[in-house]
Image: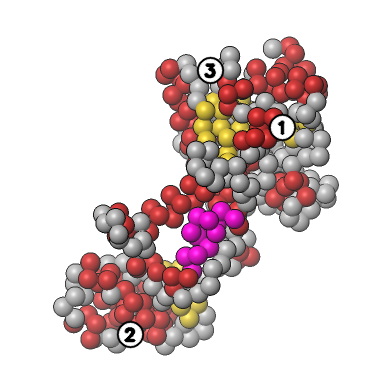
Amino acid sequence: MLDLLKSVRVLDASSIVMGPMAGQILGDLGAEVIKLEPPSGDLARTSGTPGPDGTGALFANNNRNKLGVVADLKTMEGQRTLASLLERCDVVLHNMRPAAAARIGLDAETVRRGRPSIVHCAAVGYGSDGPYAGRPAYDDIIQAAGGLAGLSMRVGGEPAYVPSIVADKIGGLHIVYAVLAALLARERTGRGRAIEVPMFECLAAFLMNEHLDAASFDADGKAGYERLLNPHRRPHATADGWLAVMPYDERHWRAILEEMGETAIPAEPWFADPAQRNARSGVLYHRLATGLTERPTAAWIAVCESGDIPYAQVNSIDDLLTDPHLAARGFFSATDPFPGRVRSVPLPVRFSDTASGPDRAAPGLGEHTAEILDRAGRE
């Protein structure tokens, strides 16, 4: 845990991944993050492989560096607990649907009434001023709605989900920068902000950054960045395995095509022009695919190393656990004392000249309720 946000208090009333991941990052940066759960607990507590105490890995990997409080916000006692927590927090984060948040007083209007300095962040499925507002939203649903699941159809496949909770995690990163920006603005103005972070719009923005392409300049232009939609753009088989190779400029392409004995393509008039070469990426990637099968992986790695051509071996997620680069950086070191913890997913960025202390394990359900409420009564 770093000390960059040590004066900031966050009430994290979110669940599953999008909000909890954001709360964990804020906690890793040093904020005091209070994890507020109903008596039944965050649904993620039972997701993934359970640890020795029965808590699922998904919860353990998204709730480090938090203090755990339980309250039933549908009761008067729970509402008193919520009011006490809000009085001492700088940020409140939830991922309830707007109507549900309003029923228990966690909507922005209610929370910020009389407390204009608080930063209120609502993580939602769809923006509140659009026709999809209020729809239930989970990662698979947003991958479909946001264009990600359908992208594979552009390369001749069927719609497919990315096998990762990618929409939630992209949304979580948007939450972090939005909250930090609002806190910085508050330092200058004394006023907080109400923030809405919609998963659908976050994924659409992420995907269309490059795929807006021709539609950027032509109202009738077709979306899609062609180089990325080339069906030959993928890791390719070598004589004994798989390798990802990405010749990026003319020098790279000349070097690897020469190794393949290819002379016709480099002699083409279009080859030296980046735009024309990009437009013919199908020709290039097809030749790359056929040529890589001629030698074993190690031989092509040597070619790439000597020509400074970007490459990578194709790792499985199990390979990452023993990857030599990650191992050298202590990437998966278990930094928190969660029961049975062998590895954890770290904060991947590093800061110079920044004090750090030990990480706190994801809390047990309501583990710090008495401590937090007692402290609130004394402050």
Give the x, y percent position of residue 323: 57, 62
- Mark number for residue 116? 3
Q: Which mark is nearer the camera, 3 or 1?
A: 3
Give the x, y percent position of residue 103: 69, 30
Looking at the figure, which quarter contains the N terminus?
top right
Q: Is residue 144 magenta?
A: yes
Q: Is residue 294 magenta?
A: no
Helix or strand or loop: what does disc 3 sit on?
loop
x 37%, y 63%: residue:
224
- Compared to residue 217, the image places residue 15 above or below, namely above
Mark 1 Cα shell of 10 Å, populated few (<14), some (14-19), many (≥20): many
Looking at the figure, which quarter contains the C terminus?
top right
**Front position in the image: 213 or 41:** 213
Residue underneath mark 1: 36
- Compared to residue 250, the image places residue 195 above or below, namely above
**Front position in the image: 64 or 218:** 218
Query: Could you tell me the amino acid type at mark 2?
Result: Met
Q: Is residue 17 visible?
A: yes
